[in-house]
Amino acid sequence: MKRRPLRACGATAALSVALLLSSCTSEVTAGTAAVDGRDTLDDPLFPALGNGGYDVRHYALGLDYDVPHGTLDATARLTARAGQRLASFSLDLHGLKVTRVQVDGERAEFSRRGDKLRVRPAQELPKGRTFRTTISYEGRPSAFEDPDGSTEGWVRTADGAFVVGEPAGSQTWFPGNHHPSDKASYDITVTVPEGYTAVSNGELTSRKRTADGRTAFRWHSAEPMASYLATATVGKFQVRTGRTRQGVPLYVAVDPREARRSAAPLGRLSEIVTWEAGLFGRYPFSSAGAIVDHPPKSVDYALETQTKPIYSGAPDELTVVHEMAHQWFGDSVTPGTWQDIWLNEGFATYAEWLWAERHGGRSPQQQFDTHYRLPADDPLWAFPPGRPGAAENVMATPVYERGAMVLQQLRNAVGDRTFFRVLKEWPAEYRHRTAGTADFIAFCERRAHKDLSGLFDAWLYGDGKPDRTY
């Protein structure tokens, strides 16, 4: 994510309520008896997010959106595999009224506590069983505000909705296992009034008029995706399609009010994807693109929604570089917990530094030196990037800028040849998977054939301003 100055993403007020309720986790019985799946994955920063006992393999979402009234009539079909014998399991869902739940075609009991939807199938689910849960729900999806004042979720606009989900906003529009460790493929169909466009992840497989004169947009994402990277943005857009130099299909949707200012930076999208593929390896998805919307002033950032980053207003060139770098770092290789978010933002920021140097700007080392001259009481040194400590810090300056500084220190310690191997081989090694900081450190040490613990202890985990550079 590329936040505007002083914007940070953290725990939401809604999540705070859910966190208080998350004490009702599992009720495990002895032996091999069925259990109630846990309603937490114990994320160190967002313990209220995610649920245990199963792994979602696929989401099929059908959304019928009434733009004038801002209401949603929807169905979610989740295909999942039970990781243990389950008597019940839970899903994350904020607001919205659930009207019916079925598991493998049979009516299931359900209940709500905070942002948790507890489902009790008619029959227990054996360990290893692949099962399908169908949830019918409706209501007015709402955004919520983070402690820093930024907004996420289903954000209504004058002509539709700006839909962003990091870290928790996806639960405002569909039920799911909303934690980055549980990735799945998606089919998302959004039906909107004639004249509106619905843009989601992956490829547009069909666009059909319905019997009542509305339009159904069907989008397919075959590659695994964390739920916070999903979108179903609705509006009146100018749409442009094309291909990169390597043949990757492009789909770019721009609000007409942002078209003029977006033209130059998005005109370089193909070049940016091509350049980043040269640094980071083959582009990891079957399509690319962008969504530029015109949301309320409460939303003032960009998010790396998979295959099509979404921008609140016309982006500048470096922001496009940043969000497209996330397609490798964050989208394809996704952090196992929110504690490891620097693996997303540090790499994307470093990509900005490399692009700037390529176009006559300062080198990454000069960028590093400028930052390092900041005094010890500067917010840059407020906490180490590998240990944000609190949810409100997850998108703060040290995660971005000091995260990039860690990479420059790594480059100095291992040399350019090894460093640029890491930039390309790390996303290849963990393509479409999740990984954590420990995985990255071990990966770097294997490539460098040396102990790097001193570097990472000081720059990734050390409190305050490190007194040593490499």
Image: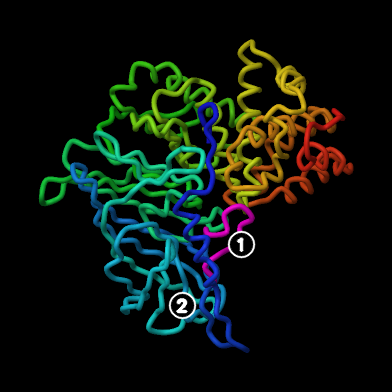
Percent position (x, y) of residue 239? 30, 29
Magenta residues, start to end? 38-49
- Residues 272 and 408: in front is 408
Percent position (x, y) of residue 201? 40, 44
Residue 226 appears left or right of 339: left
User: Is 223 included in the stretch rendered in magenta?
Assistant: no
Above or below, 121 relative to 379? below
Q: Which residue is mark 1?
A: 42
Residue 77 appears left or right of 404: left
Q: To which quarter of the image does residue 68 belong?
A: top left
Q: To which quarter of the image does residue 377 belong?
A: top right
- Residues 177 and 131: in front is 177
Residue 42 appears left or right of 371: left
Q: Which residue is mark 2?
A: 88
User: At x 39% / y 26%, what residue is drawn?
Assistant: 313
Crowding near the residue tagged with mark 2, few <14, some 14–19, many ≥20 C-alpha atoms within 10 Å: many
Q: What kind of residue is marked 1? A: Asp
Q: Quadrant of the C terminus?
A: top right
